[in-house]
Structure formats: structure tokens, C-alpha cells
Image: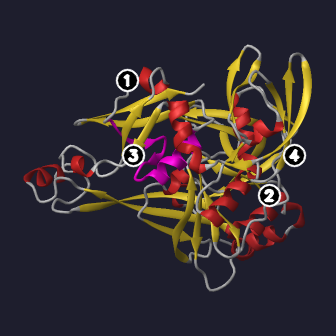
Amino acid sequence: MGARRRVAVLAAAAAAAAWSAAGPRAMAAAPERRSPTVEVVERVGPAVVNISTEQRVHNPFYGSPVDEFFGQFFERPPGRERWVQNSLGSGVIVDPAGYILTNEHVIVGASRIKVTRSDRTELLAEVKGVDPRSDLAVLKVEAAQPLPAAPMGRSDDLMIGETVIAIGNPFGLSSTVTSGVVSALRRSVRTGDRVYTDFIQTDASINPGNSGGPLLNVRGELVGVNTAIYSEGQGIGFAIPVDRARRIVEDLIHYGEVRPAWLGIEVQESERGLTVRRVFEGSAAARAGLAVGDRILALAGDGIENRFELDTLLSRLRLGQQVKIEIEREDRRMHLDLPAEEFPLPAAEALAYEVIGISVGAIPQSRQRLAFLPEWGLVIEKVRPQSRAAQRGFEPGDVVLQINDSALRDMEGFRKAVARALGRESMLLLIQRGHFRHYVTMDLS
């Protein structure tokens, strides 16, 4: 190789080495490459966390020959009373004091929750509250310094086609970013026995790893909470609107549970649309003058065509908020004002007997000695003739173990479960009779 050629090769090698060392920084500093997405990720990325959970599962065969036999085939050693399962998801810090918003399905059943920040700092988290109905949960971590938090924006002014950015931690990879556009608003999705309403639909990739992470607009504001619940379509992602999440977060932080707004009506869907089937005595609806047969057209300025839309609008209301309801009565349109009130828990037992058709009580001491009775639940003391419960074959002596997602351990839990269930299209109950348990879906429409 000639001297001139050697000099050229060495110069090229030196240039390549200089580019590999300084090139990424130079490119990052180039103004034309600093897109809004880059700026959003840099600004909000530190507020996005990884969530890993441990769930201790009881081994019923501990200490038996069966345990040793099955231990040969499953990924767990024999002779362990409990073993640990791990799951991964994402979350977003919404308050510098250490409050983290995520999906309920990311942390459900966890006995230990670990949060990992973008700087690899690890913190143990406690659950402040969960709302299975909306698939949201709030965690709390303790840190020496205020934490970076994502600013909350609005979702009521989102535009179809607007650019959105999803940040999460899919499959253990930190700060993974996907972007897309808003494809649709107010989507309803059914998965299993749940119906989720009022979703933002986006073509930004959302998978189990970034479920619970933030959906952001180009200003870096939180407009939704990503949730991976739909696996039947490619390029379809869903997020819970921040306007709905904001009210739920406030309730979970302050009360540990969501306190649903209640107007005091029972509705039904018909050819006319959504109509009032029952007005509960003493409720806000009764005081405002709503009547059976009124057709509900709008609530707080938003049109209503079905039960799901009414449920969605109610979930956004703050307790005590004055709302305007538009109705149609005998071909006349009317506007009535009424407050969004908290469900009156003392009335839950009477309403359960009226609407469902059962009255319940604690399992008598004399029956608690029977081997087949569960450790929790409430016994049905009376079934109202011709009621929904009577039509489904409920009998006195049956034990109600669960209503929807709520296990029943005392009367207070029963009252709260009834409050959350009334107004839904159906109710799922877990019933035990003798040695046998079965689920019963009760239509409330």
C-alpha cells in the first residue's frame, strides 16, 4: 500500500472514530431533529415508572407427595408452601408527593409492589386505592425529594387525528416510546364479563408492558392512561381519558375508594331511547321533579343515547356538583337542575330488597360450625316473592360471597357493593348453597 493510500485510510478511520464518539451528541443537538415528540419524552420521561409485582400463591399440597410429583413438571421446587409470580407494567407519577397512577389489572392481587424510576432508583409502593370498574389504581411511594410529575391536561378537547405519544416499559425495557394519532373517542370495549366505556382509541402501540403508562399530547400533558385490554386487532390501542381519571384519582387519594355520584333513578333502554323506570323517594331526582317515563336526552351538556353513556357521564361528576339534565316528557323538552349526590349507604339494604329482592345478614354462629360454610359472605335471610332474585331461584340460607368485584365480609361491604352495582346493566353474584358455588348474572336493565 502506497504512502498516499495509507494516509487516506488512516484519515478515514480517524474520521469514523470521531463520528462514532461524537456523532450521537451532535445529532441530538441538531435543532432540526428536536421534534415535539423528542421534547415531550425528555420532559415527561422521568415521571414514567416501571411497576413490578410479586404475588404469593398458596400451595394447597404443601408437604404432601402430590407436591413433590407436580413439582417435577412445573417451574417451582417441591416443598414450598408458597411461590412467587411476577408481572410487569407501567405507571406515571401524577403528584410530586409520590402518588402514581396505573391500571388496576397491573397490580391486582399483588402482595409486594416495586416501582423503578428512569434513573434506576427502586422504591416499594403501597396501594392507596383501586377502582376495578374503570381499571385504575393509585400507588404511593416515599422519596426523600419531590418526584417529577406529569402535568395533567384535558381530554374533552381531543381531536381525531391529533398526535399522541405513549411512554411505558414494555417487557422490562425502560422508557419505550410509541406515537400515533387519536383514531376515535368514547369507544366502548367488552372484555370477559366487563364492559369498559369512554376510551380514547389510538394507533400508538399499547401492550402489557406500557399498560398503565401515560398517553400524552404534543405539549407533554397527560391526556389518558394507556390500557392493554384488547388483543383482537392489530394497531389498536386504548387509553382512559384523563378527565375521567382525574376525579377517580382524587377519590382514591383522599378516601381510598371511588365514591360514585348518584342521581336517584333507575333507567331502561327502549325504542324511545333511555327512559326513567324508577325514581327513588327522597333522591335528588325526586326533588328535581323527574318522573317515570321521562326520556333522558343529555346530562351536563353531553348527549345520552344509552346506559353506558349515562354511566360514563356520572363517573365524571364530582359530589355536590350541580348538573343540568335535559329530558323529554310528552313531546316537550325540559331542563332540570339537580346535585350529584353520594349514594345513601343506610338505604342500601332497603334498595337491595326492592331492586334485587334479597335481604342478608351475618352467618349465624350456629351455622358457622358447619364444615362446608365459607370463611366470609352473608347469608340470605329473605327473598322477596316475584323479585329478580326469586326468578333466579335464590333461597333463604344461600350465602352471597361476592357482588361483581367485591367480596362480602360484612354488612358495610354489602352496602358499598350495592351502591356500586345499582345503575349497571347487570350484576354478577357468587352464591354458595351447601358444598357448591356458582356465579349468577342478574339482569338489571
Q: Helix, strand or loop at disc 3?
A: strand
Left or right placement of residue 441 versus residue 184 in this view: left
- Front residue of 143/419: it is 419
Q: Which mark is residue 157?
A: 4
Q: Reading the chain from its start, which is encountered first: label 2 or label 4?
A: 2
Marks 1 and 3, how far apart at CA? 19 Å
Which residue was labeled with disc 1? 393
Mark 3 or mark 2, which is nearer to you? 3
Marks 3 and 4, how far apart at CA? 48 Å
User: Which of the 4 image quarters holds residue 25?
Assistant: bottom right
For disc 2, the neighbor class at 10 Å (few under 14, some 14 to 19, many from 20) is many
Left or right placement of residue 384 versus residue 307 in this view: left
Q: Reading the chain from its start, which is encountered first: label 3 or label 2?
A: 2
Looking at the rendering, in which quadrant would you find the N terminus? bottom right
- Front residue of 201/423: it is 423
For disc 1, the neighbor class at 10 Å (few under 14, some 14 to 19, many from 20) is few
Q: Reading the chain from its start, which is encountered first: label 3 or label 4?
A: 4
Give the magenta-colored segment's residue range.
398-421
> Are discs 3 and 2 less than 8 Å apart at CB?
no
User: In the image, residue 285 lies at what x, y percent?
Assistant: 76, 37
For disc 4, the neighbor class at 10 Å (few under 14, some 14 to 19, many from 20) is few
